[in-house]
Amino acid sequence: MSADRRPLSPHLQIYKPQLTSVLSISHRATGVGLAAGLLLLTWWLLAAAAGPDSFAVVQDFLGSWLGYLILFGFSYALMFHLCNGVRHLFWDAGWGFELDTVYKSGWAVVIASVALTVLAWAIAIVSA
């Protein structure tokens, strides 16, 4: 047998990213981000229970530019995970596996998650 120098299985250096793989990885990443966001929510709730001084510290952090950036990222992760989760529910029912439909639903997830995030922040800003 001749020694083949080719890789035994494909990896990221061979394939360029496709929408389906990027959305799959993003779904996992947003799940991790949502878990991290729950730690922030827990901090906020514990500070509220600890008293006004502790709560003011958390509110000051969340009111800073970094806090707003984190909250915006958390809300985008929530909307993306929600939209992509609905897409997966359709797949669980056996619908939407045609290649054209997979790409259309993938772009719909991206557009809907951005639109829902912007809408949620617009409503929050207007009502503040």
Image (cartoon, helix red, strand yellow):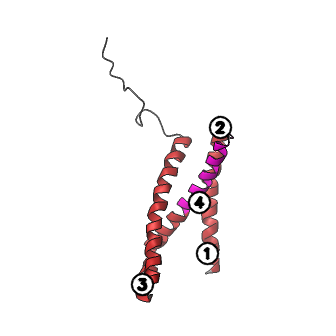
* Residue 59 drawn at (x, y percent): 46, 81
Residue at left offset 52%, top offset 67%: 72
Residue 2 visible in image: yes
Alpha carbons under labels 4 and 2: distance apart: 22 Å
**Label 3, label 4: how many angstroms apart (C-alpha)?**
30 Å
Q: Residue at x 49, y 72 (%)?
A: 68
Q: Residues within 10 Å of mark 3 (few under 14, many from 20)?
A: few
Where are the magenta residues, as a range? Answer: 76-95
Circle 1: residue type: Ala
Disc 4 residue type (three-letter): Met
Find the distance from the CA under tag 1 to the CA under tag 3: 26 Å
Q: Determine the secondary structure under disc 2.
A: loop
In the rendered image of this protein, does residue 46 appear above or below residue 30?
Answer: below
Main secondary-structure element of the magenta-colored stretch: helix
Which residue lies most toward the top here? 1
Point out the frontmost of discs 2 and 1. Answer: 2
Q: Which mark is residue 79?
A: 4
Which residue is tagged 1? 124
Q: Taking 32 as reference, is 92 above or below it?
A: above
Q: Are marks 4 and 2 in contact (CB under 8 Å)?
A: no
Q: Secondary structure at mark 3?
A: helix
